[in-house]
Image (spheres, grey):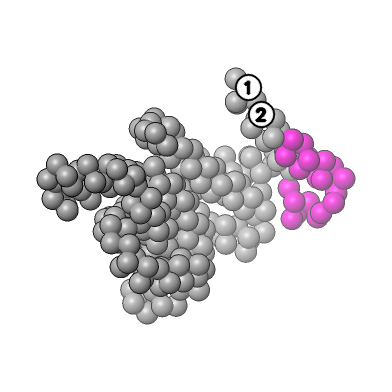
Amino acid sequence: MKALLVPAGGAAGFIALWWLAVLLRLADPVLLPSPLETFNDTAKSFTQGPLLHDLWRTVTRTVLSFLVACAIGVPLGLLLGAKENVYRAVEFVVDFFRSTPASALFPLFLILFGVGEGTKIAVAAFGAALVILFNAAYGVMNARRTRLLAARVMGASPLRVVFDVMLWEAMPQILVGMRSGVSLALVIVVVAEMFIGSTDGLGQRVIVAQSLFESGLMYGVIFVAGALGYLLNLTFLLLEKRFIHWAGK
C-alpha cells in the first residue's frame, strides 16, 4: 500500500496545483480548462468519439515498430557484441544515429517509404532498434568471461555460445534496451502521427483538438499518451523483476 500511496500522492498534488491555477485564473480558461472539464471531454471522446480508435491505432503502430526493432536490434547486437573489434568499427555510426533526433529523419524516411503507415513504423523501428542494439552489444561485451570460456572448453560451437550463453548473460541489459526502445518507439509514433499524413492516432488527435481549441480534449489525449508510456515502462520493469532473476548474480 505504501508503494501505491506515494505515486498517488504525487498525482493528487499535481491535480491540486492544476485546480489552484484554474481558480486563480493564471491562464485563460479556454487555454487551461479545469481537471474536471478535461476528464469529461476525454471520457466523452472515449465513449462517443474517436479516441478509443486513436488509442488502438497508436498502440498497434508502437507494438509493430517495437517488434521490428527487436527483430533487428537483438540479433545484430549479439553478433556485434560477440566481435568487439567489429562493434568498435561501427560504434560511431550507431552512436551518431542513436543521438540524432528521429524527427530530423522524417524527410529521409518519407523519400524512402512515402506517406503512409510504413513510414511511421519504419522511423520508429529505426530509432528503437539502435537503442536495443546498443544495449544488447554492451550486454554481450560485459558478459562473464568464465562462463564463455567454460562453454568453449566443453566444445560448444560459436553459434551455441552466442545464443546459449551470451544471450542469457546479456538478457538484463537487453531488457533495459527494450524498455527504453518501446518508450522511444511510442514517442516517435506519436510525433509521426502529428506530421506524417495521419488521419488517426493520439498524435493526430492532439493536433486536431489544438486546432479546434478543444483544450480539455487536447490535455486529455496528452495524459492518455503519457499513461500509455508509463504502462509500457511499468510492464517491462515487472518483466525484468519476474523473469530476469539472475541479473547481477
Q: Amino acid at mark 2?
A: Val
Which residue appears at 43% of the width and 32% of the height?
A: 241
Above or below residue 80? Residue 54 is above
Q: Quadrant of the N terminus?
A: top right
Q: How many marks?
A: 2
Q: Which residue position is annotated with label 2?
A: 6
Mark 1 lies on a secondary structure that is: helix
Residue lying farthest to the top in this orientation: 1
Where does the image place residue 31, in percent across and percent down from the top left? 74, 55
User: Is residue 148 something one can see in this rendering?
Assistant: yes
For the residue carrying disc 2, how many other residues have a C-alpha within 10 Å: few (<14), some (14-19), or many (20+)? few
Which residue appears at 17% of the width and 53% of the height?
A: 158
Q: Nearer the viewer, residue 208 or 21?
A: 21
Q: Nearer the viewer, residue 179 or 92?
A: 92
**Distance from the alpha carbon under mark 1 to that under mark 2:** 6 Å
Q: Which residue position is annotated with label 1?
A: 2
Residue 189: quadrant of the picture: bottom left
Residue extent of the magenta highlight: 13-33
Q: Is residue 148 magenta?
A: no
CB atoms of marks 1 and 2 within 8 Å: yes
Which residue appears at 50% of the width and 54% of the height?
A: 202
Q: Quadrant of the C terminus?
A: top left
Q: Amino acid at mark 1?
A: Lys
Where does the image place residue 28, in percent across and percent down from the top left? 81, 55
Q: Is residue 21 magenta?
A: yes
Q: Nearer the viewer, residue 217 or 125?
A: 125
Mark 2 lies on a secondary structure that is: helix
Where does the image place residue 186, in percent across and percent down from the top left? 46, 54
Q: Which mark is residue 201?
A: none
